[in-house]
Amino acid sequence: MTTTAPSGFQTGFAIRPDLVVEAARAEDVRTAVADAAARGLPVHVHATGHGQPGAIEGGVLISTRRMDSVEIDPVRRTARIGAGVTWGQVIEAAVPYGLAPLNGSSPSVGAVSYTLGGGLPVLAREFGYAADHVHALDVVTADGVLRRVSPAVEPDLFWALRGGGHRLGVVTAMEIGLVGAERLYGGSIAFHGDGTAAEVAGRYLEWTRTVPDTLTSSLAAIRYPDLPQLPEPLRGRYVISVRVAYTGSAAEGERLVAPLRAIGPAVADSLREMTYADSHTIHSDPPFPHAYYGDSVVLDGLDGDLAARVLELTGPKAPMMTVVQLNHLGGALAARPAVDNAVPYREAGFLLRLLSPLDGTDVASVRALYAEVAGLLAPGALGRSLGFSFGGGDRTEGFHDARTQKRLAGLVSRHDPASLFGGSYGISPGGR
């Protein structure tokens, strides 16, 4: 145990707990939770720090980064992963068997935390949410008991933990299903956005209505700073790009992306066949720690005119740099998994994500801009995504639909009546 907080990927919010527990095994977690409960101290969990919901002040912080074991069962196509494992570690262990996890775009993100929030994989439209592929979990609940939950054992907890986040305990290990994906066709195609962003967005939205469920894509818009370390075509420019992931043949992939290439001259085009181990290059997320704020809007649908207005608000004339990402949903994401879970809004057509660096920008200004975007999208908004709220953890509304929220709140009342785990995306007992 120590009072020194672990460093994490998110540097924008303070981490000042009273006590830090560097857990190396499940028993360390169990002891820490039992001790915190006896002292009446709140419990927070920290793996890589990518999805930190806000500042942590006081209480006990359990760091799981040392719990980094990965065990692959190639026959059953499963992986057993520790609470501190990153997606990059799972990919590295699975690839030799021709298998892949349902990971997100960044290999340095913690696999367990990402999955507890639902998890939007690189191949989301083909295989669904990461939470849909969980077979079992080991979790320490507020009573200090280590439980193994599955569809047959404690099914209510199994339902809630897959999509409900950290609110019901500290997950120490997880068994997940893997898929056969040795290679894929993917990458990104980027266009200069000044004066053309609305057209590119409109053409992209039209294109999403024509693609098969086996193709996953997103649109991203960013105003790059004028920095010498950036490539010349991007330096100081407003760029809008489309990212693609498709497990079909390269020839069919080329045919499917032809309408994107017809939009106009590209600043960059990395669309190609690749190994699954190179799938992180599709999005090329920043690999270095930094300060940022982020939130999202889950939408039933989106038209070109509305998308253009969002890009106008968040583009070069915006008061701060804002990264906009629009994920095309549907496909397998719309289907209920074999064993139901707490992932909401499966009827959604798109997920709009906003992220702003905080260096030199105050959170209040970012929130004001995001509120303006949310107001614009309100008529078609279903809610927010639990997995993509970075710094907005004090706002819990909208993460789940009313029915799911009520069921989660009931389970919190039963398993954590003292709100021991209330610090992370809190679901109040009784639904408050």
Image: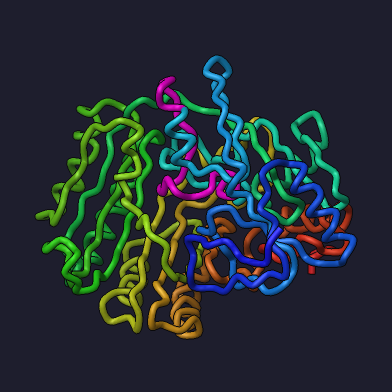
Give the x, y percent position of residue 147.
81, 38
Give the x, y percent position of residue 66.
60, 46
Q: Give the range drawn in magenta.
A: 94-114
User: Who is closer to the viewer here, 226 or 41?
Assistant: 41
Q: Quadrant of residue 277?
A: top left
409 relative to 160, above or below: below
Give the x, y percent position of residue 171.
70, 45
Q: In this view, does 383 lie to the left or right of 210?
A: right
Residue 275 appears anywhere in the view? yes
- The residue positioned 54% from the left and 21% from the top of the image is 77
Q: In this view, does 117 lie to the left or right of 296?
A: right
Q: Is residue 428 left or right of residue 54?
A: right
Instruction: Please say whether residue 63 is one of the residues in the magenta stretch.
Output: no
> Total marks drawn?
0
Visual colour scheme: rainbow
- The residue positioned 55% from the left and 70% from the top of the image is 391
